[in-house]
Each structure stands twice: as structure tokens, then as C-alpha cells.
Amino acid sequence: MLATTSVLPIVTSGHVTVLRLFDLAFSIDLIKAEKLWTSQDRQGARSKLTRTPKKAVDFGEAPLTLMLPSVSLILNELQGAIEVKISVTARLYAFGVVTLVLQIPADNLRWNDYTSRVNAVEDTIGPKTDTELWSQILKQLCEQIGAAFIRPNRSKLVEDYLVATVHSFSEPIPAAALGRDIDLVPLLSGEISPLSEGAKADLLSRRFSYFTDDLVVLTWDRVFIYEPHHATDVAEVLEVANAQFLQMRYYDELLDAELPKMYALVEEATRHRSLGGPRRFATLARRLYMLVAEVTELTEKVDNALQVTEDVYLARVYTAALDLFRVKAVGNAVDRKLAIIRDTYSALYDEAASSRAGLMEVAVIVLIFFEVILALFHYL
């Protein structure tokens, strides 16, 4: 039986991973990016899940993982400041998102010290910090593979996610004991003060296990993973969900900005009716059509970034993450705005066609009038 929390276990193998996701381009040519990277004698490979069979998971286009030089970082933990060496990787997605992955070792730490390290990492390079480290790594990456970015247009939107992973403890611990005999709340919440029972229950509500010795506990900005088999599948699936959320947020804000412009252009085109009216309507309609086609193409790539088919456990985690991150809710908002633009495009197209028909009728009447006049002059 596991000892009480007064005798805390030691995390003999674990790490803390911080993800920061950037939207850098309309899309990324992953084949070109890989060639650019490997031409500099650097390591790069397409991502694949380590334990899940290929037939159980389908990447729309597998992201490209690039190994970057490691860096050092000072962490201010409860026991004092320490310097740690961080491994750095970047993952590129075809739909224009780049994830920088910083992994900090957390071996041979008693549980409360492991929790302290997780929170120290968050305080040092988490979403509330403005460290130059992220900018330096991103700049270095863009300088080397920026030519693979198609229509680069860096968005100000950024997503962060923290992954606390334990592979082994100093003594065997069943998954059921985590959260019962070992308090996960300070690690998942980052709070020092005790939480209410309701807040605790909500924090631990998204809990998943497949075997008796593995566990995933999801929250909005953190996840705890107990994975004795050293698999990375869950962490990579959660990264894909974050990438999808970031991209959907980008399209949502893009359409939010486009709708007022569209209304203004439609009003202007309607107000200034002239012989050039049909062309103005047609030009605006084409612009809206291109916007709809572009966003639809990219949202389909985002939706198809990962399809979990036969792995029920991974599918449960992935679906819970999509729900927690509100990917589908934001995607539905994007679809509604696209529908408005489609309807406007149809109306403009009909208006342009109607205006052309009206002009043709006027032209025919004018021609008939001149023919009558010419006939009169001929007989006179």
C-alpha cells in the first residue's frame, strides 16, 4: 500500500515540457523545410506516434520535427535558483503553425520538489512571462527555413501549454493513487493556497487511464501525464489539438475583421450606382469568393490534421482536449461567418448579373431608338 503524503515518493524519471505555438504563414511547405534544414547537417523527421499503430491514427500531413541546439535556463525554485539544460525542438504543421517545444529534465525529485519545478518553469517561461528566449529561438528557426513559409504573415495570437510528465517513481504507484494519496492539485493549478472542493473536483474531472499504471489529467493550460512506457502519443495529440485551436482562433479573428469591411464595401457599391456598378459588384463578389475559398481550404486542413480511428483511449483524450480547448465551438463560429460571406457573395453575384441584364435592356432600347430615327431620316 502507498505511504501517506507525509512520506512523498521520488520522481526518478520525468520532465516538464512547455509548448508555445505561433501562426507564421498561410501554409508551410514541409518537404522544402526539411530539405533546407537537413542541408545544414541538422536533424529533422516527420512526427509519428510511438505506441499507436499507424492504422489507428491518420495525420492529414504529418508535422515535421526539427532538433535545435539546447539552451540553459535559470529556474527559481523553492530551494533556490538552479541552472538547467533544456532540449529544444520545433514542430511545423502544413497549415502554417509552428510549435516550439522546450523540455526541462525533472529526475530524482521528491514529489513536492517536482511540483515546485513545474511551477518554476511556468513562472520562468510560461504564458505570463515575456522572456526573450522564445523570440531568439523563433528568429533562428525562421532565418534557416523561412523560405518554406508560403505567404508568411505572423499573427499576434500565441498559445501556450505545459506538460508535466512522470515516467517512474521510486516505488510502484497505481494510477488510482494519484490524486488520492498524492495531491495533484498544486501541480495542475499552480496555486499555493488551498482550493475549494468544487474547484478541486473540476480540476481533476478530465481524468483518463488505460492501464492500471498510466494516467492523464487534462486542464485548460496544463496536463499531467503518468506514462511508465515512455510513450509520447498523448502529449503529441494534445499539441495537435492546441495547434488546431490556435489556427481556428486566427480564422475567427480574421473573419471578425473582414465582416465590417465587407459591409462597408457592399454599402459603398450599392450607394454609388453607375455604369461601372456591375463591374464593382463582380469585383467585390470575386474578392469574397477568394476569401471563402481560402479559409475553407485551410480550415479543412486543420480539421483533418489528425483523425484518431481505432485507438479508443487516445480518441477519448483527443476528443476531451478538443472540447476543453473549444476547438469545435470556435470552428462553428468560423463556419457561421463564412456562411454570411457566402450569402453576401451570392447576393452580389445576383446583383451584378441583374445590373448587367438591366444595362443590356437599356442598350437594346437605345439601339432600337436609333434604328427608328435612322429609318425616319431615310424615308424623309
Image (cartoon, grey):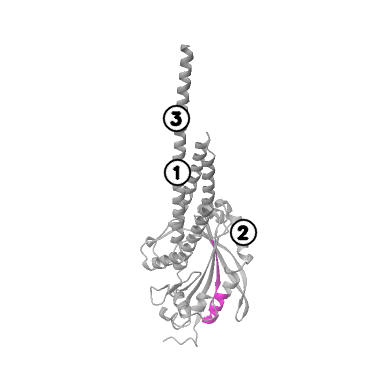
Task: Decide which of tag 1 and tag 3 comes sooner along the chain.
Answer: 1
- SS at circle 3: helix
Q: Which quarter of the rendering shows the N terminus? A: bottom left
Task: Decide which of tag 2 and tag 3 comes sooner along the chain.
Answer: 2
Tell me the residue at 50%/75% (across/down).
188
Residue type at numbered disc 1: Ala
Splitting the image into 4 quarters, where does residue 237 fall? bottom left
Residue range corresponding to the magenta coloring: 99-119
Q: Name the residue under label 1.
A: 347
- SS at circle 1: helix
Numbered tag placed on residue 139 in the rendering: 2
Residue 320, above or below 174: above
Q: Estimate how packed mark 3 is, as few (under 14), some (14 to 19) or many (20 or more) residues with alpha carbons within 10 Å.
A: few
Q: Is residue 145 rendered to the left or right of residue 376?
A: right
User: Residue 160 location in percent, x, y?
Assistant: 54, 66
Instruction: State the residue in front, 3 or 157.
Output: 157
- How many numbered discs sit on the rendered protein? 3
- SS at circle 2: helix
